[in-house]
Image: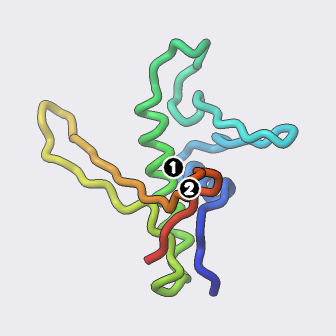
Amino acid sequence: MTARTDLTFQELETALAAKGLTNALTVISGKLYVDISVVNGVTVADLTVEGVAELLYKLRIAAGNAQTTVNAPLATGEQLASYPPFSYGPPINGQVSVTHVSTFLVPLNENLILSPNV
C-alpha cells in the first residue's frame, strides 16, 4: 500500500459519528463547515460563546480514532503518526488532566501540512 499523509474529512466525520456526533461536518457550495452545536452539544448564538477547548478536544479525539482506523491495514512505515494516544493524569477533585500531542510535517512556507509516518 501507499503511505498515508493525512486523514480525509470523511474519515474524521465517520469517527465523530461513531461518538454520536452525527453530521458535525458538512460541505456546502465547496466550503466545509463544522457544526459546533453538534460537536459541543450547545447552541452558539455568536462568537462570544466559550467552547474552543471542548471543540478542539473532541476533534482531536476523533482524529486519533480515525487515524487508528486508517492505520489498521497499513504496514509499518505507511501509517499516520500525527495523533498519538492522550496522556491522562490522576483524578483530582473530579477532573482529569489530559495532555495530547499532535505531530505534523510542516514545510517552511506552511502551505502543505502532512502527517509523518511510523
Residue 15's tag is 2
Q: Which residue is mark 1?
A: 19
| Residue drawn at (59%, 69%) of the image | 5
| Residue drawn at (52%, 12%) of the image | 48
Q: Amino acid at mark 1?
A: Lys
Give the x, y percent position of residue 36: 58, 30
For the C terminus, the quadrant is: bottom left
What SS does tag 2 mark? helix
Q: Are marks 2 and 1 in contact (CB under 8 Å)?
A: yes
Give the x, y percent position of residue 70: 56, 71
Residue closer to the observer: 74 or 22: 74
Relative to residue 103, is residue 48 drawn left or right?
Answer: right
| Relative vertical location of residue 93 with respect to residue 80 in this rendering, above or below | above
Relative to residue 45, is residue 84 drawn left or right?
Answer: left
Mark 1 nearby-residue class (10 Å; few <14, some 14–19, many ≥20): some
| Relative vertical location of residue 39 with respect to residue 84 in this rendering, above or below | above
Residue closer to the observer: 64 or 31: 31
What SS does tag 1 mark? loop
Give the x, y percent position of residue 52: 46, 29
What's the colour scheme?
rainbow
Residue closer to the observer: 15 or 79: 79
Q: Amino acid at mark 2?
A: Ala
Residue closer to the observer: 86 or 43: 86
Residue 7's tag is none
Mark 2 nearby-residue class (10 Å; few <14, some 14–19, many ≥20): many
Mark 2 or 1, closer to the camera = 2
| Residue drawn at (55%, 58%) of the image | 107
Q: CA distance from mark 2 to mark 1?
A: 7 Å
| Relative vertical location of residue 80 with respect to residue 86 in this rendering, above or below | below
Occupied quadrant, residue 103: bottom left
